[in-house]
Amino acid sequence: QVQLVESGGGLVQAGDSLRLSCADSRRTFRRYDMGWFRQAPGKEREFVAAIKWSGGSTYYTDSVKGRFTISRDNAKNTVYLQMNSLKPEDTAVYYCAATTRPVLTSQFEYDYWGQGTQVTVSS
């Protein structure tokens, strides 16, 4: 069983940065491709970024390209989301998720989820 725990969320101003972390205490972490999703109030959960198990390939939704960076440290069983130049529209609960399936941009392809961490960006 995969157990994912996010941290690093908070309240920031527009233009600030945050780094989210997602830790998995199990040794199987390195077998999984990892994704970050977010859900704003009244909206559907949406894909933000994903990274292959090796760290060799990354994927981003268009609205965060150039501002967010996903990375992972398999030795620490942790995936990160560095978020720069934050905007009020980035306000959401951010979730990390794990999958072994090939489509990384769809939430329905992920089997394991964290509990989420709130990110609030004020204008």
Image (cartoon, helix red, strand yellow):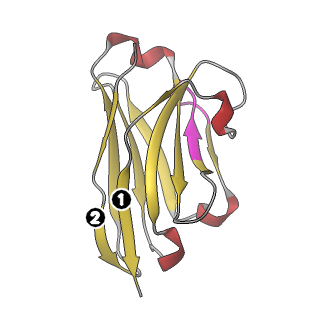
Compared with 119, 36 (above or below) is above
- The answer to if 42 sits in the magenta stretch is no
Q: Residue at x 69, y 38 (%)?
A: 106
Span highlighted in magenta in the image: 49-57
Pinpoint residue 97: horizontal percent, then vertical percent. 49, 34
Toward the right, the furthest residue is 103
Q: Amino acid at mark 2?
A: Gly
**Residue wearing tag 1:** 118
Q: Is residue 13 left or right of residue 30?
A: left
Q: Main secondary structure of the magenta part?
A: loop
Q: Amino acid at mark 1?
A: Gln
- Label 2: few (<14), some or many (≥20) within 10 Å? some
Compared with 3, 61 (above or below) is below
Q: Is residue 88 left or right of residue 19?
A: right
Pinpoint residue 75: horizontal percent, then vertical percent. 30, 22
Toward the bottom, the furthest residue is 123
- Label 1: few (<14), some or many (≥20) within 10 Å? some
Q: Which mark is residue 10?
A: 2
Instruction: Count the marks.
Output: 2
Q: Is residue 70 left or right of residue 77?
A: right
Pinpoint residue 107: horizontal percent, then vertical percent. 64, 38
Say if mark 1 contacts mark 2, CB within 8 Å: yes
Quarter holding the N terminus is top left
